[in-house]
Image (cartoon, rainbow, N blue to C red):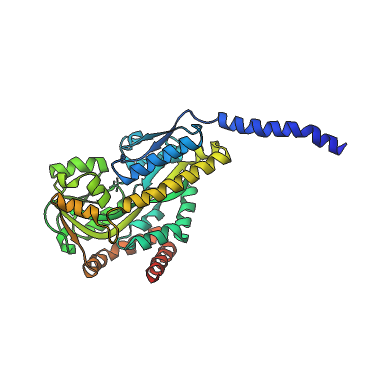
Amino acid sequence: MKKNLLTSLLPLVLGLAAGGAAFAQAAYKPEYRLSTNVNNAFPLGRGAEAWARLVKERTQGRINVKWYPGSSLVGGETTREFTALRQGTIDFNVSSVINWSPHVKELNLFLLPFLVPDEAAFDALIRGEVGKELFAIVEKRGVVPLAWGENGAREISNSKHEIRRPEDLKGLKFRVVGSPIFNDIYSALGANPTQMTFADAQPALQSGAVDGQENPISLFVGAKMWTLNQKYLTKWNYVNDPLVFAVSAKAWESWTPADREIVRQAAIEAAGAEIADTRKGVSPGDDALIRQAEAAGTKVTVLTPAEQHAFAVATRPVVDKWAASIGSALVKKAEAEVAASRRK
Ligand code: EAX
């Protein structure tokens, strides 16, 4: 009897399984919305575009991703993307941790000035325990982080004069991203920080409403900031902000396990290519982007380790204040991973 029952139930079970997958796919949306703040003139935008293309191709269009650059789905306010992901009004996002850090305080770790001196240290953090721990923290917030990308080592530019010492920032007005830690960093250096979006920063630089800004050289060159009065650029590597390739948990839970793995694998591949893209022309032995800025008339200053150290000392109070908020155990773990990367 038992065997007959099993064999008679088998077709029903198989039918349900197949029907179940079909049923699950029937719950798919006709379009999934991917938000980024910049377009494909920048590595972040190119990475997002590649991710969207891979997902559409590999799911045969089941997950039909439409890209919305300019943070247009959140009225241009990039720092609103994380909340929109949690609510499910955005399904895919590639964003710098800077824009998420007002909502996930632990992500300010990467914004601690002079914590991450080079690419080896950056890779150690995103590939090690710290990266895993941060992904787990984000996941608890209704967002599924799939891969780390890289915005790049952030350098400082301005229209007034060369920056070599902390006192050189005194009184200068800087556009900074809308995340509180940046106000503390620039105030500690005697500057006047003003928070605004990347899109608003460009006319503000052009009009002289602000004197300077800070961004990776790939964005400085991508936005041709020498046309925005940015005559002086200092390579000080004070922060290197990772990008996160993430999806809304609401979208993630509606997909079949097979499609989830396609989305994950596509994120890993697109993020790896994006990191290589953002490092092109600014890595040791490859300074093509710096040369491009100089050829356009920018005076580029590369700080010596001693000059960099003077800025690290001047901003140490900011590190001490924010380490408590981030979690001192996580900060200590990050410092250990950075130190270990320097011994390799
Ligand atoms: O997210 O706003 C910024 O300066 C960011 O570095 C850029 O838009 C990439």
The relative height of residue 240 versus residue 261 in the rendered view (above or below) is below
192, above or below 5, in the image? below
Q: Is residue 173 among what the camera can see?
A: no
| Residue at position x 30%, y 63% in the image | 114
Q: Which of 113 and 157 is in front in this view?
A: 157
Relative image position of residue 116 (x, y in whole percent): 34, 62
Query: Is 342 left or right of 11, judged from the image as shown?
Result: left
Extreme residue in the right direction:
1
Q: In the image shown, does 16 or 109 lie closer to the viewer?
A: 16
Q: Quadrant of residue 86?
A: top left
Q: Position of residue 324 (x, y in %)?
A: 38, 61
The quadrant in which the N terminus is found is: top right
Q: In this view, does 254 lie to the left or right of 201?
A: right
The residue that appears at 37% across and 62% down in the rendered structure is 120
Front-lying residue, 171 or 221:
221
Q: In which quarter of the image is the C terminus?
A: bottom left
Where does the image place residue 38, in percent across and percent down from the top left? 31, 41
Compared with 45, 314 (above or below) is below
Viewer can see residue 64: yes
Taking the image as shown, residue 248 lies to the left or right of residue 49, namely: right
**Quadrant of the rendered structure where residue 337 is?**
bottom left
Q: Classify residue 257 by image quadrant.
A: top right
Residue visible at 41% across and 62% down?
124
Total labels drawn:
0
Q: Is residue 315 left or right of residue 26?
A: left
Q: Where is residue 121 in the image (x, y as percent from the top left)?
A: 37, 63
